[in-house]
């Protein structure tokens, strides 16, 4: 049974007494609440449930005025016939007051729902949709007529409402699947915001100018045209413009007071609000001020256009000084990494709400949201707008009455199985219909240094078997905190180490003493590779991580052969903590380590602590050819081109032999996804960011160091010992002169 959820409800996130008291006086303010670290999207002064969506805490309005439809699900209500013939606010003014009075409550309620959102019963459960979502469902026209309610879109609009309410946020970066409805939802929000804004500018960008124009003419304009008169301002120019939609005369909020007091000759103030589109380019909208920027297909910008460069420019259009005055709604599937996907991937991960600067902003200023394809795949959404994950015992029905006979998970897996022989085709399918973020950013098989087919086979296999049960997270510690005794492994959800195998008790902490020095007792069982660092902190507080990887080799011991058993990719607060972590792992497993000696502090730390015997000398040189430093601390330089090539070749060879689907029909037992993903994107000419690849490659080299041992050059000399040579042909032997 599929059990993933897009959000979780935080029970008692706000103290019940505080919640009750503040609700009573309607004191909850719209926006970010620092005391409770949550974004309040309610505009009523009252809040109810607190959702957590992709690590962002969002306070919903309190349940109120819950609508019950006869069908127990969302129903779009048609505009009353008496109001259908009224096209503009000017037409409305021509009607008598008693007619207006009849429709006052109806119109006012629609404005209220637009502002506060809407509660209704869906499949027996109270369900909240935002005002924007309500406007989209109730009053927007899309290519198939009217939009259907989808639970995935409900979560999307709630998250978007939080982005709008949060004064620290520039908007959202939405990673989506194909045909998820983003373009229509973004168009609906554009029209919704534009029709209530004064002296504002709304912009649209896409992967090309033609795409932006199409979104404007085929989505934005029809939605605007089909708004009911009480929401629709009078527009300037053509009914269906091609380049700019200009709102001049607003639709008034219809109140009894305005009905009574309005005079026919009264002039209404103009909105002076426009919606337009621009050709794709780094400097589009540069120097302008925008209330909303819609970024469609942001993951498909190809050279020379660059979404990162564009965002650096257009971000300034959304602020005045430090104050954010506009928002960006960005959404896309991803191209392959060399076709714009890499830039969008960086922008997406730079929008992680858990990583903020001192001003409370993410690196990009946006908030990232990913909704897996199974939540929003057309044809597998039932009449309640809920995904049909698992194959039902009896067919479900979609909103149009079509039977759904299998679940979306089974359908997706069938598609994947059918593409197993076509890795590029499979990767494209993953990008279009991703179930994970990793799927969304899958690269082309031909673009990798290593066999990407095998790497992705292993990644997918690991995901299928839910390898969390195989890998244990934790930390190493000295027993009773006494250094240089014995080390134990303590499982912890906050641990820096990930291990898939620990040695049996008889092999743990195995050390050999020679001439007062310590040497690893299990060198015949495996080794570690390490990409270290020397400086605790960096100016930007980022820096690369330290990485440690453990690999076994074939032995007669009770040890799984050629198995990566440990992964450590972290940057603790001080370098010394990292050094001690590495040392404890080596001691616990009783295995040596091959580390880069161009960052020597780790190796000097080992020597100072009496563990020089654990540091492997560079295997490509005989001892007499080692430098003074290399003899002192061991290790291998990373500057040599020969070493770089040998290192990459070591990984390549291991992947070919042990990763992915084997000739036996079994899959490899390499379970560390971060390392696999690092291999997939490894760049030999820019190794700095590939910590996992560096350490894992060194581990492979350490376990196969005999391969790199140089052959000693022996000079052969010929010595004359004075013996005569004879020619024995014929009947007489003759001396050969």
Image (cartoon, grey):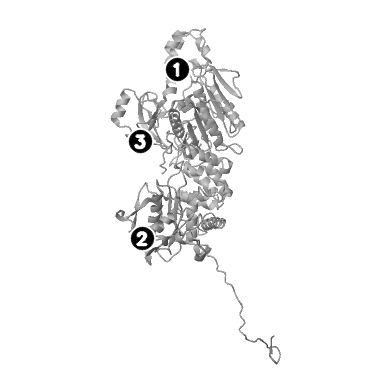
- Which type of secondary structure does the marked residue at label 1 adopt? helix
Q: Nearer the viewer, mark 3 or mark 2?
A: 2
Q: Earlier in the sequence, mark 1 or mark 3?
A: 3
Residue 14, quarter of the rendered image: top left
Quadrant for the C terminus, please: bottom right
Q: Earlier in the sequence, mark 3 or mark 2?
A: 3
Residue 437 sits above or below residue 253 on the image: below
Q: At x 57% / y 25%, what residue is drawn?
A: 276
Q: Residues within 10 Å of mark 1 (few under 14, many from 20)?
A: some
Q: Earlier in the sequence, mark 2 or mark 1?
A: 1
Q: Nearer the viewer, mark 2 or mark 1?
A: 2
> Label 1, label 3: how many angstroms apart (C-alpha)?
35 Å
> Label 3, label 2: how many angstroms apart (C-alpha)?
44 Å
Q: Residues within 10 Å of mark 2 (few under 14, many from 20)?
A: many
Residue 38 image offset from top left, x and y in percent: 38, 32
* Residue behind mark 2: 509
Q: Is residue 12 left or right of residue 200?
A: left
Residue 349 image offset from top left, x and y in percent: 48, 40
* Residue behind mark 1: 107
Residue 644 image offset from top left, x and y in percent: 54, 55
Residue 20 sits above or below residue 482 on the image: above
Q: Residues within 10 Å of mark 3 (few under 14, many from 20)?
A: some
Q: At x 39% / y 49%, what residue is drawn?
A: 496
* Residue behind mark 3: 10
Q: Is residue 664 visible?
A: yes
């Amino acid at each position: 049974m599929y059990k993933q959820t897009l959000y979780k409800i935080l029970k008692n996130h706000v103290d019940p007494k505080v919640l009750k008291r503040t609700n009573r006086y309607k004191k909850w303010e719209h926006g970010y609440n620092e005391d409770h670290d949550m974004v309040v999207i309610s505009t009523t002064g009252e809040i109810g449930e607190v959702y957590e969506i992709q690590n962002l805490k969002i306070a919903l309005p309190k349940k109120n005025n819950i609508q019950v439809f006869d069908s127990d699900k969302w129903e779009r209500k048609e505009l009353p016939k008496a109001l259908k013939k009224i096209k503009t606010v000017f037409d409305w003014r021509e009607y008598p007051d008693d007619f207006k009075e009849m429709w006052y409550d109806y119109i006012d309620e629609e404005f209220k729902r637009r502002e506060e959102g809407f509660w209704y019963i869906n499949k027996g459960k109270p369900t909240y949709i935002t005002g924007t979502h309500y406007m989209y469902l109730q009053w927007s026209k899309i290519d198939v007529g009217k939009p259907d309610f989808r639970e995935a879109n409900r979560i999307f609009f709630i998250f978007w409402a939080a982005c709008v309410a949060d004064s620290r946020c520039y908007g959202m970066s939405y990673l989506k699947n194909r045909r998820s409805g983003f373009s229509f939802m973004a168009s609906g929000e554009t029209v919704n915001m534009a029709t209530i804004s004064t002296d504002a500018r709304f912009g649209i960008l896409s992967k090309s100018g033609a795409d932006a124009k199409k979104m404007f003419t085929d989505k934005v304009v029809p939605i605007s045209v089909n708004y009911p008169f009480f929401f629709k301002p009078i527009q300037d120019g053509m009914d269906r413009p091609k380049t700019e939609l200009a709102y001049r005369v607003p639709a008034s909020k219809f109140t009894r007071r305005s009905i009574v007091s309005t005079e026919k000759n009264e002039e209404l103030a103009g909105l002076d609000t426009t919606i337009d589109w621009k050709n794709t380019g780094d400097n589009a909208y540069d120097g302008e001020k925008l209330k909303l920027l819609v970024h469609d297909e942001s993951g498909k910008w190809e050279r020379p256009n660059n979404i990162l460069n564009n965002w650096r420019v257009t971000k300034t259009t959304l602020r005045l000084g430090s104050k954010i005055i506009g928002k960006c709604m960005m959404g896309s599937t991803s191209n392959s990494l060399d076709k714009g996907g890499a830039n969008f991937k960086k922008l997406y991960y730079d929008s992680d709400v858990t990583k903020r600067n001192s001003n409370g902003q993410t690196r990009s200023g946006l908030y990232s949201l990913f909704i897996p394809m199974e939540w929003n795949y057309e044809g597998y959404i039932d009449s309640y707008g809920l995904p049909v994950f698992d194959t039902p015992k009896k067919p479900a029905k979609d909103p149009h009455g079509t039977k759904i006979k299998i679940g979306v998970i089974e359908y997706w897996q069938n598609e994947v199985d059918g593409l197993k022989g076509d890795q590029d085709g499979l990767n494209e399918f993953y990008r279009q219909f991703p179930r994970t973020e990793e799927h969304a950013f899958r690269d082309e098989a031909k673009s990798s240094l290593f066999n990407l087919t095998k790497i992705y086979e292993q990644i997918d296999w690991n995901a299928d078997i839910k390898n969390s049960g195989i890998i244990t997270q934790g930390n190493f510690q000295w027993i009773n905190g006494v250094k240089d005794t014995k080390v134990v492994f303590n499982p912890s959800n906050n641990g820096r180490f990930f291990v898939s195998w620990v040695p049996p008790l008889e092999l743990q902490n195995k050390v050999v003493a020679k001439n007062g020095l310590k040497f690893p007792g299990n060198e015949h069982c495996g080794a570690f590779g390490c990409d270290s660092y020397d400086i605790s902190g960096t100016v930007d507080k980022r820096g690369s991580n330290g990485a440690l990887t453990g690999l076994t080799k074939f032995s007669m011991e009770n040890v799984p052969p050629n198995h990566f058993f440990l992964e450590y990719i972290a940057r603790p607060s001080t370098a010394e903590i990292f050094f001690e972590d590495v040392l404890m792992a080596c001691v616990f497993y009783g295995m040596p380590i091959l580390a880069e000696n161009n960052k020597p502090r780790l190796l000097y730390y080992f020597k100072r602590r009496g563990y020089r015997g654990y540091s492997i000398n560079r295997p490509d040189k005989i001892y007499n050819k080692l430098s003074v430093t290399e003899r002192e601390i061991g290790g291998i330089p990373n500057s040599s081109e020969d070493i770089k090539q040998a290192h990459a070749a070591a990984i390549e060879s291991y992947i070919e032999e042990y990763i992915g689907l084997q000739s036996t029909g079994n899959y490899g037992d390499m379970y560390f996804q971060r390392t696999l993903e690092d291999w997939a994107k490894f760049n030999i000419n820019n190794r700095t960011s590939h910590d996992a690849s560096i350490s894992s490659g060194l581990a492979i080299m350490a376990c196969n160091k005999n391969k790199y041992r140089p052959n000693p050059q022996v000079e052969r000399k010929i010595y004359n010992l004075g013996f005569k040579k004879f020619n024995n042909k014929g009947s007489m032997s003759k001396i050969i002169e």
